[in-house]
Image: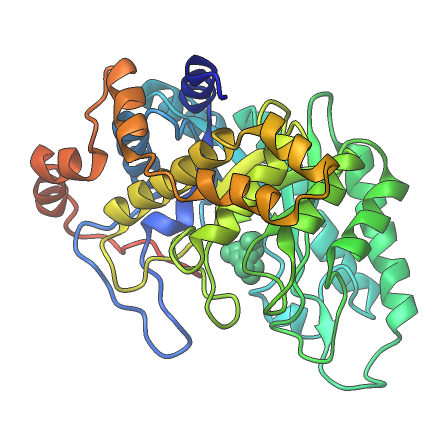
């Protein structure tokens, strides 16, 4: 038996962080398809994020990516966010778009390039101070393409030195979130390829260094919920970058390619106490061909649906079946929850929060898109890599 009131309370209190870059234009290596009405500035990205929060009620923070979201006055940007009813979330570093980083950033063989990269990471902490952000999110494109190109061990030492310098700069209440990815853009050896490497660095740094699980950053067939369970047991799961993949790092809407996987992940999050801890549930997606705001709303709803299903798992019946070695019975408990249509429950939760039960329909009805397209003329549309 599940306590429906508790399930609804947990869903009301859930928070999903949306990424500034998902609101801008994006594309593949082949083409960026520009869309009308796309934000031209970080301020306009925050306005779009605030629209998503107003409609869903559960997207109160926005990740920024530096320098894509560079402004002169970050405190003013944070104040604007506050006026819109949202807050600045994680500050994402970017050490992957300069010519200087051809051979890497913090792992580069040349100390001068490493200094530049560390300087950028320290600047990101300054931006956290100015915006009130608590999370520094690091992903490194560092790696090598050919065996022998550089020394694998030496690069780990350089990485450890850089992380230690940045970790020491963190203020009270600030965390370092280290993201791994198994390949791309490096193809032979990536310097932070997996959760084990990220975890080993975090362990050395201290309690406020935690691992980011980007759901698109694993080899096909990887059991991501096992990684989630392990990191939660060790107190080192800092955040998710949610998205879906069919092939590689596709950055499609979370819960679209494999909703069952998202449910299994959320079930382990719940088992490990991750829904009520400091784990940040961020989206890291690009909406290349679809309308962006409805896609982000849809993604938030997909996370809510997976969470609701996980909350509906009859934990007592599951424990009994597991204890009795009832393989099929235990599996059936999970599948019963997964196969529940939770949309009416979530509609009720939204109504309890004073929201429209169908946020996508409400967005289309609002006419906001038409208004914004008319307003946002001139300037350069912001986008991935801009
Ligand atoms: C790398 C990544 C990382 C970056 C983002 C734009 O693939 O997942 O999180 O910051 O994409
Ligand atoms: Mn990511
Ligand atoms: Mn990625």
- Residue 169, above or below 381: above
Q: Between residues 25 and 267, which one lies in front from this camera angle?
A: 267
Task: Give the residue drawn at x 83%, y 63%.
Answer: 111
Q: Between residues 126 and 190, which one lies in front from this camera angle?
A: 190
Residue 336 seen in the current view: yes
- Residue 85, above or below 20: above
Task: Give the residue drawn at x 40%, y 44%.
Answer: 339
The image quarter in which residue 149 lies:
bottom right
- Residue 52, above or below 349: below
Task: Give the residue drawn at x 65%, y 27%.
Answer: 273
Q: Would residue 93 appear left or right of 78 to someone viewing this image?
A: right
Q: Would residue 291 appear left or right of 238 to someone viewing this image?
A: left
The image quarter in which residue 286 lies:
bottom left
Q: Would residue 15 appear left or right of 192 to someone viewing this image?
A: left
Residue 126 seen in the current view: no
Q: Position of residue 379 (x, y in %)?
A: 23, 52
Image quarter where the C terminus lies is bottom left
Q: Position of residue 272 (x, y in %)?
A: 68, 32
Which colouring convention does the figure follow? rainbow
Q: Position of residue 40 (x, y in %)?
A: 28, 48
Q: Position of residue 66 (x, y in %)?
A: 53, 48
Q: How many marks?
A: 0
The image quarter in which residue 128 lies:
top right
Q: Would residue 106 appear left or right of 100 to someone viewing this image?
A: right
- Residue 338, above or below 82: below
Q: Between residues 379 and 288, which one lies in front from this camera angle?
A: 288
């Amino acid at each position: 038996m599940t306590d429906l009131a508790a399930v609804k309370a947990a869903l009301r209190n859930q928070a999903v962080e949306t990424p500034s870059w998902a609101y801008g234009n994006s594309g593949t290596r082949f083409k960026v398809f520009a869309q009308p009405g796309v934000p031209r500035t970080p301020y306009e990205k925050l306005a779009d994020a605030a629209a998503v929060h107003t409609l869903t009620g559960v997207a109160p923070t926005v990740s920024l990516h530096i320098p894509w979201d560079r402004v002169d006055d970050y405190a003013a940007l944070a104040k604007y966010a506050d006026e819109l009813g949202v807050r600045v979330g994680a500050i994402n570093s970017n050490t992957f778009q300069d010519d200087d980083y051809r051979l890497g950033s913090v792992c580069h063989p040349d100390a001068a390039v490493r200094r530049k990269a560390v300087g950028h990471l320290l600047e990101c902490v300054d931006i956290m101070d100015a915006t009130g952000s608590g999370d520094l999110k690091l992903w490194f494109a560092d790696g090598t393409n050919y065996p022998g190109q550089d020394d694998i061990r030496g690069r780990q030492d350089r990485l450890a030195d850089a992380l230690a310098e940045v970790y020491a700069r963190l203020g009270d209440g600030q965390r370092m979130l280290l993201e791994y990815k198994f390949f791309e853009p490096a193809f032979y050896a990536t310097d932070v390829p997996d959760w084990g490497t990220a975890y080993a660095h975090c362990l050395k740094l201290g309690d406020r260094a935690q691992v980011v699980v980007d759901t698109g950053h694993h080899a096909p067939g990887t059991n991501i919920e096992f990684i989630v369970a392990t990191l939660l047991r060790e107190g080192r799961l800092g955040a998710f970058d949610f998205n879906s993949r069919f092939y590689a790092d596709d950055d499609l809407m979370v819960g679209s390619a494999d909703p069952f996987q998202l449910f299994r992940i959320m079930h382990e999050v719940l088992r490990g106490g991750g829904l009520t801890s400091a784990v940040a549930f961020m989206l890291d997606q690009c909406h290349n061909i679809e309308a962006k705001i409805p896609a982000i709303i849809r993604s938030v709803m997909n996370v809510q649906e997976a969470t609701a299903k996980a909350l509906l798992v009859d934990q007592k019946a599951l424990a009994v079946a597991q204890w009795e070695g009832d393989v099929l019975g235990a599996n059936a408990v999970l599948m019963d929850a997964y196969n529940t249509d939770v949309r009416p429950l979530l509609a009720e939760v939204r109504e309890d929060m004073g929201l429209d039960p169908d946020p996508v329909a409400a967005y289309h009805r609002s006419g906001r898109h038409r208004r914004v397209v008319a307003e946002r003329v001139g300037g350069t549309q912001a986008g991935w890599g801009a």
